[in-house]
Image (tube, rainbow, N blue to C red):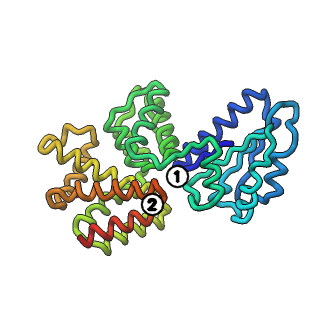
Amino acid sequence: MHFIFGIDAYSVKKAARKLARDFVDREGSDFNLVRIQGDGLKVRQFFDAVSPLPFLGDKRLVVVSNLLTLGDKEARKSIVDKLKDIPDYSDVVFAEEGDPDKRESIFKVLLDRANVQHFDAPTPYAVTDFIKEMVAKDQLKISSQSAHQLSIAVGTDLSRAENETSKVISYTRYLGRDEILPEVVVALVEPVSSIKIFDLTDAIADRRLDRAFSILGKMRQAGEDEAMIFNMIIFQLRNMLIIESLGSNSSQSSLHPFVVKKILVSFRKFKTGEVKKFYHELAELDWKIKTGILEFGTAVDILVANFCKS
């Protein structure tokens, strides 16, 4: 069995597709590859998928998507009790786009018995590296500033990062150039509301609890992922610490000048040592999230409330 889960939906899908592709390559066909959605899945349907003997092959592979996050709770309870009854010739991939409830028995059993791959929300730095790798594979060049500018625009959604990077690659080739220029990124990529992170940290620095929660509310209404919000706050504070360490040489950082300018405005609103204190509190909350004590949304609310009231 395989258990693939995490907030990074792009990587979850990619890992599940790779297992399916490798299976087809080994078997020589997709006759015995079955994909089923967990939403509305019944126990009978699950065992109807895993039980039949392989057709013109040795193995079956059943990929179940989002059973733990979207499926019926009673079905999950029944399935976990019968996982031991899955025939040896069937392999099952449970792929979850999100973090399932860690208290459920099926989560604990899969964590213990399956081959586990967990994909946490990507950091903005990881998105920048992802963009650079895409551009390099296409045999083009992109500066660190342009890659960072693009990552700021797309947030921490790797699917969007892939789509927008493909777009600027195609346009750069159309122009007959071998390097992606900052003005191309600005012209083609509409920034997500990650730019509101600057406004959010400003509100926190000003101890404006009402404004901070108003910004958070708008980001959530726009469908922004809680993990993305949390990680962008970490990213913003880490950049502030980088700028602080450089002092008057802040222009020497690898950050885009626009980002440096915005960070300096926010940073100057904090008292000496406050950014480092804020960052350490985030690190502690990050540990609590990873250990299942807190959810991302709750952690963000606690952090903002505590700091604004300090």
Image coordinates for residue 17, horizontal then vertical, percent: 65, 39
**Whether residue 268 is visible:** yes
In this figure, which residue is indicated by the disc labeled 1?
Answer: 7
Q: Compared to 241, does 41 lie above or below?
A: below
Q: Earlier in the sequence, mark 1 or mark 2?
A: 1
Can you say which quadrant of the picture contains the C terminus? bottom left
| Amino acid type, callout 1 | Ile
**Whether residue 193 is visible:** no
Label 2: state its secondary structure.
Answer: helix
Left or right? Give the position of 188 relative to 272: right
Instruction: Please tell me how many numbered marks the rendered image carries.
Output: 2
Callout 1–callout 2 Cβ contact below 8 Å: yes
Label 1: state its secondary structure.
Answer: loop
Image coordinates for residue 309, horizontal then vertical, percent: 26, 73
Q: Which mark is residue 296?
A: 2
Q: Which mark is residue 56?
A: none
Q: Compared to 234, does 298 lie above or below?
A: below
